[in-house]
Image (cartoon, rainbow, N blue to C red):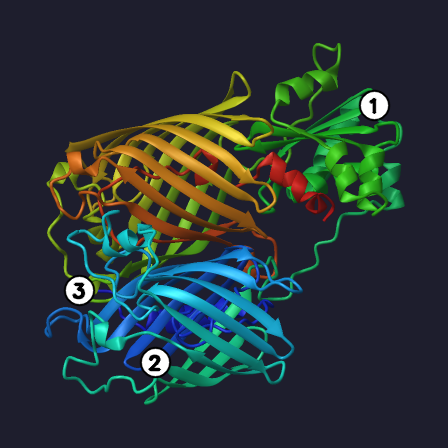
């Protein structure tokens, strides 16, 4: 039996905050986490690519959650509201007070200008039961030391309430909150407003008029005979103090009869690490080294160049020379940024290659399979590296293509064969150890349950394109096992994910993955992959995939097929012979915005339970972090028997964090964390170890590489 230890938050929270103590303008947040006053929003949002964690107590309400600015004009908020004095379930459950999940957004329609106010449109609690649902528009203007806001709201913030619909499944599109947001009428609302006085750079004094009518609340702590009196006033006032760029404390007098307070921690995503980074200077050749490169034939030069690039910790390195050209090919096991890795390899060759070699081809490999070639003029690279030409100049000068064979043919010219060096720093076997976090929200027995595991991942690449991966996890902390197991929503053959809690409750060592695969180049500059084995906790089987990009990787199309067996919970290798599933997809990709590094993927087809539909995935990748959101819509009404599955839209968010922010050196590894509100059987497929579809994999889009060209000389 595994020993229970401290709550997970006391272990992880200080570590995560210390790693992410990165400067971000400290805008004030209201108690529900949106940028605003106390109960009302204003027209400000956090700086682009920022996150806010908050815990606020405004009795009888306690709010905790996270707000994010995924784009410079959009703020999104996910939080829980706990209502003191209102039972969540029956008194005998371990759930405690009523808790409601809320998703909110604020969109800037117009930035503030000299004579014009800023304008925002927003929605609170936009999906689900509709207890706190509102929509609003607001104007804001800074005048001297003051920041004024005037807005109009309908719904809870507008002094009304949102009547419940008849939908029994709040996860479907026919839910109370979403129906309210779709309604275009704005009548019946009320105005709200606020003023902030910026007394000092750190102290803000503020007041607001909030038209919320608490008598109309559907889960009402004021009218159920509890210990809270109805509000005496619609005026709230107080102060917020910023200890630094990250930490903010709030104190206010609410509704004429309540003192409230809260804390918010805000930071910006950045590649900066929690520890001083070890120096990682580019290698410089001394005179002795340069002497070694005199009077070499092409074979000798090829061997020595490959060895130098391998010394920079690139793997599976080969080199060739022909006339005035150098050819390199290698895998990048060192940096999260492939562009930085290629720049380091070219810089290394530039240090020692004789001056008559003025063109360098650097081919990036994945699992020892060539996938992308960078061609650069050596003099132009020198000028860029030494700050003599601009980023824009190098963006135009650099040739970046997936047509590897075409580039190699150009390199060797009329020669049928060119000498290739032996392979240096062959990376046949590798491993990494990382944490894995799984959270389970809003179960009747426990509102927030967490499992923290240590993961050991082993990789074996015996020959080009061939890969084997094993991954085992051992739990370090687990309170998901305290949750009682509900009956499956569906019969065994349709219970794809609704029994996943059994896998998460398991307290023994688990084999998460064990697969063997092969990836290869196919005609038309496309890639194909086959993978066989244990894909994740629940499924074992076969995954086939083909993928091709277009227009400098701005678009992509792929095909995918899966045939899966359901796995046993408590046996690492056993599968159920009678529980088999298959899935078929058309995968589509588009680079929506190079400016914001914004990507969209569509997975269209038939999912494992036989439901047909589409998964929409939108993500942004910046500064090595990725933030994404997805939603899956299928014909679930025609496939499933359970009302919880019928009409359900599977949705969630995910965050990918480079592990190097937690350490002092370069580590090519990513911590993945996903959050989905429920575990249902709709729109599910198995997760192979490696996918060609870019929405499932690390992002190294050619267009984005050119945008981030400064990394080419780091």
* Left or right, residue 504 beside residue 205: left
Q: Please tell me whether mark 3 or mark 1 is closer to you in this view.
A: 3
User: Residue at label 1?
Assistant: 324
Q: Are marks 3 and 1 in contact (CB under 8 Å)?
A: no
**Cα distance between the residues tagged 2 and 1:** 72 Å
Tell me the SS state at disc 2. Answer: strand
Quarter of the view holding residue 513: top left
For the residue pair 33 and 131, the one nearer the viewer reads as 131
Label 2 sits on residue: 58
Pinpoint residue 324: horizontal percent, then vertical percent. 83, 23
**Element assignment for label 3:** loop
Image mark for residue 444: 3
Image depth: mark 2 or mark 3 in front: 2
Q: Are marks 2 and 1 in contact (CB under 8 Å)?
A: no
Task: Name the residue nearer the viewer: 558 or 178.
Answer: 178
Question: As displayed, is residue 583 above or below residue 615?
Answer: above
- What is the x, y in percent for residue 355? 88, 31
Is residue 20 at all visible to an observer of this figure?
no
**In the orientation shown, which residue stands out farthest toward the front?**
187
Circle 2 residues within 10 Å: few <14, some 14–19, many ≥20 = many
Disc nearer the start of the sequence (2/3): 2
In-front residue for pair 665/586: 586
Q: Residue at x 82, y 20 (%)?
A: 323
Q: Measure how far apart labels 2 and 3 are at the Cα level.
A: 24 Å
The N terminus: image quadrant: bottom left
């Amino acid at each position: 039996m595994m020993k229970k230890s401290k709550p997970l938050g006391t272990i992880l929270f200080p570590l995560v905050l210390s790693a992410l103590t990165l400067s971000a303008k400290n805008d004030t947040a209201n108690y529900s986490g949106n940028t605003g006053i106390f109960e009302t929003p204003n027209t400000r949002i956090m700086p682009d690519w920022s996150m806010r964690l908050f815990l606020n107590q405004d009795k009888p309400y306690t709010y905790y959650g996270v707000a994010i600015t995924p784009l410079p004009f959009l703020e999104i908020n996910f939080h829980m509201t706990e209502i003191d004095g209102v039972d969540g379930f029956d008194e005998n459950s371990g759930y405690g007070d009523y808790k409601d999940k809320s998703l909110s957004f604020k969109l800037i329609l117009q930035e503030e200008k000299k004579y014009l106010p800023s304008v925002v449109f927003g929605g609170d609690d936009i999906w689900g039961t509709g207890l706190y649902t509102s929509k609003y528009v607001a104007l804001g203007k800074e005048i001297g030391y003051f920041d004024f806001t005037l807005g109009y709201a309908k719904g809870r913030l507008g002094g009304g309430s949102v009547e419940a619909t008849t939908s029994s499944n709040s996860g479907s599109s026919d839910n109370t909150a979403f129906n309210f947001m779709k309604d275009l009428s704005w009548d019946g609302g009320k105005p709200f407003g606020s003023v902030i006085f910026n007394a000092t750079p750190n102290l803000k004094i503020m007041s607001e008029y909030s038209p919320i009518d608490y008598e109309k609340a559907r889960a009402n702590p004021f009218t159920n005979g509890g210990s809270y009196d109805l509000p005496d006033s619609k005026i709230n006032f107080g102060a917020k103090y910023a200890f630094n760029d990250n930490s903010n404390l709030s104190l206010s007098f609410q509704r004429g009869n309540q003192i409230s307070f809260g804390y918010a921690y805000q930071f910006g995503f950045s590649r900066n690490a929690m520890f001083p980074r070890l120096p990682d200077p580019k290698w410089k050749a001394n005179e002795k080294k340069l002497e070694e490169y005199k009077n070499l034939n092409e074979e000798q030069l090829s061997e020595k160049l490959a060895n130098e690039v391998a010394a920079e910790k690139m793997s599976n390195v080969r080199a060739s020379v022909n006339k005035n050209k150098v050819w390199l090919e290698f895998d990048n096991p060192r940096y999260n940024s492939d562009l930085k890795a290629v720049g380091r390899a070219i810089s290394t060759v530039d240090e020692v290659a004789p001056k008559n070699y003025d063109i360098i081809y650097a081919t990036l490999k994945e699992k020892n399979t060539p996938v992308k070639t960078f061609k650069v003029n050596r003099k132009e690279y020198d000028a860029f590296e030494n700050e003599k030409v601009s980023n824009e100049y190098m963006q135009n000068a650099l040739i970046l293509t997936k047509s590897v064979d075409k580039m190699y043919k150009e390199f060797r010219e009329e020669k049928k064969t060119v000498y290739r060096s032996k392979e240096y720093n062959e990376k046949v076997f590798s491993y990494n150890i990382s944490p894995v976090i799984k959270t389970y929200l809003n179960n009747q027995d426990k509102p927030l349950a967490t499992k923290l595991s240590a993961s050991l991942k082993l990789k074996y690449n015996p020959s080009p394109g061939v890969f084997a991966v094993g991954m085992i996890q051992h739990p370090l902390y687990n309170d998901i096992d305290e949750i009682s197991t509900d009956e499956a929503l569906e019969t065994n053959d349709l219970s794809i994910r609704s029994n996943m809690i059994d896998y998460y409750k398991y307290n023994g060592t688990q084999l998460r993955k064990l697969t063997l695969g092969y990836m290869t180049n196919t005609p038309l500059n496309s890639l194909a992959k086959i993978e066989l084995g244990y894909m994740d906790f629940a499924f074992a089987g076969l995954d086939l995939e083909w993928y091709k990009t277009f227009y400098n990787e701005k678009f992509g199309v792929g095909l995918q097929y899966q045939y899966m067996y359901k796995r046993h919970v408590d046996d690492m290798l056993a599968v159920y012979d009678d529980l088999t599933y298959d899935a078929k997809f058309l995968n589509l990709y588009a680079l929506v915005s190079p400016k914001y590094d914004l990507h969209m993927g569509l997975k269209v087809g038939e999912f494992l339970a036989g439901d047909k539909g589409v998964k929409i995935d939108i993500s942004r990748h910046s500064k090595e972090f990725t933030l994404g959101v997805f939603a899956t819509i299928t014909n679930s009404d025609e496939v499933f028997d359970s009302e919880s599955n019928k009409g359900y839209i599977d949705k969630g968010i995910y965050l990918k964090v480079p592990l190097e922010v937690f350490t002092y050196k370069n580590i090519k590894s990513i911590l993945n964390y996903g959050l989905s509100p429920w575990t249902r059987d709709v729109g599910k497929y198995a997760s192979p170890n490696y996918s060609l579809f870019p929405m499932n994999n690390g992002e190294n889009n050619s267009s984005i590489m050119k945008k981030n060209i400064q990394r080419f000389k780091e």
